Image: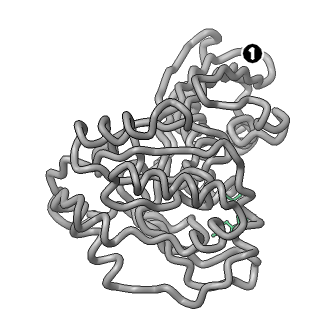
Amino acid sequence: MVRAGSVIKLEAYAKINLTLEILGKRPDGYHELRSIVMPVTLSDTIALTSTYAQTAMTITAGPGVDLSKIGSMEHNLAVRAARLMQLRYQVNAGARIHIHKRIPIGGGLGGGSADAAGVIVGLDRLWELGRPRTELMALGAELGSDIPALIHGGAVLMEGRGERVRGLFEGTPTPSCQGFWLVIANPGIMCSTPEVFRKWRGGLTASPLLLHNMTSSIRTSDVSAAALALHNGLQPAVYESYPGVAQTAARLQEAGCLGVLLSGSGASVFGLARDEAHGREISRRLGAGMWHVVAQTCPVV
Ligand code: C5P
């Protein structure tokens, strides 16, 4: 029996795609992907309170988050995730969801997906469901392609539409990585994910070498090697359609990043830094005019 008033608080971490290979178009209209995804220390804070009433959500925003970009509550992924959990597991209780957003909306950093992932994991605890993580990941996949990777957490290899996810170092000795420092910037525009995928015209980009190089640079915390292995198959289409994104990437490069890449389907871009001091130096050079944060990748496992 779920007690009304129980509260769970958790951080929903944004993600970056260090590699994003588009392997082709599938008969269901989606694209076949292969991507190395890592959570970063930029996060939304989620508070979940169990209630006997219907599920409801409130949102507040941190600096640089434009709440006018949030669609209707009915379409919000976090609300849809809560309703799906209620229905699937026949839960009589409801939940009050409060999200304090710091991850830019529609920014290719998986903010909406991270919130949905956090709600799924949090409600599993709040409602004492005890479902296995793989089951929660499959449930998340029904709502959005990035959600399973964010429920899994850590560095993952994401394949298929996004639903096939495994730990990047699964089955191998756990590496003791330090993680990468990076600067994430957002030009304040939104890229439409379906439109970006529609505009993708590239050929096959499957490269075992790319995957190998990025995996080993994460394992050895070699940020210079990681900078050389950065790849996003959607980047040309996004830079062409949204010149503001390409300009933001150029500014990160000029400010001294070791390598710069579009995150997901944009509009955020990130640049790798040698260490924290280098990240802060890049941030100083960028100045206050453009939204950006200095962050670090989260532990890999
Ligand atoms: O699954 P999600 O809602 O995140 O995807 C948003 C849109 O991105 C899809 O409707 C589809 O147009 C495109 N997409 C795709 N192939 C993927 C993931 C997303 O074409 N693997």
Which residue is denoted by mark 1 in the rendering? 52
Q: Where is residue 88 in the image (x, y as percent from the top left)?
A: 71, 45
Q: For the point 31% across and 71% down, which residue is it?
A: 228
Q: For the point 71% across and 49% down, which residue is it?
A: 190
Q: In this view, does 103 lie above or below 58?
A: below
In the displayed structure image, the side of residue 32 where residue 191 appears, left or right = right
Q: For the point 26% across and 63% down, which residue is it?
A: 169
Question: Most extreme residue toward the bottom, as rendered?
Answer: 203
Residue placed most toward the observer, 98 or 242: 242
Q: Is residue 148 above or below residue 112?
A: below
- Element assignment for label 1: loop
Residue 135 in sight in this render: no
Locate ligand 1 by image quadrant: bottom right
Residue placed most toward the observer, 299 or 120: 299
Q: Where is residue 224 in the image (x, y as percent from the top left)?
A: 23, 63
In the displayed structure image, the side of residue 32 where residue 198 appears, left or right = right
Q: In which quarter of the image is residue 61?
A: top right
Q: For the point 76% across and 39% down, which residue is it?
A: 76
Quadrant housing the N terminus: top right
In the displayed structure image, the side of residue 38 where residue 174 appears, left or right = left
Residue placed most toward the observer, 164 or 33: 33
Residue 177 in sight in this render: yes
Label 1: how many Cα within 10 Å (few below 14, some 14–19, many 20+): some
Q: Which amino acid lies under the numbered mark 1 shown in the image of this protein?
A: Tyr
Label 1 residue near ligand 1, CB within 8 Å: no
Q: Position of residue 17 (x, y in %)?
A: 46, 60
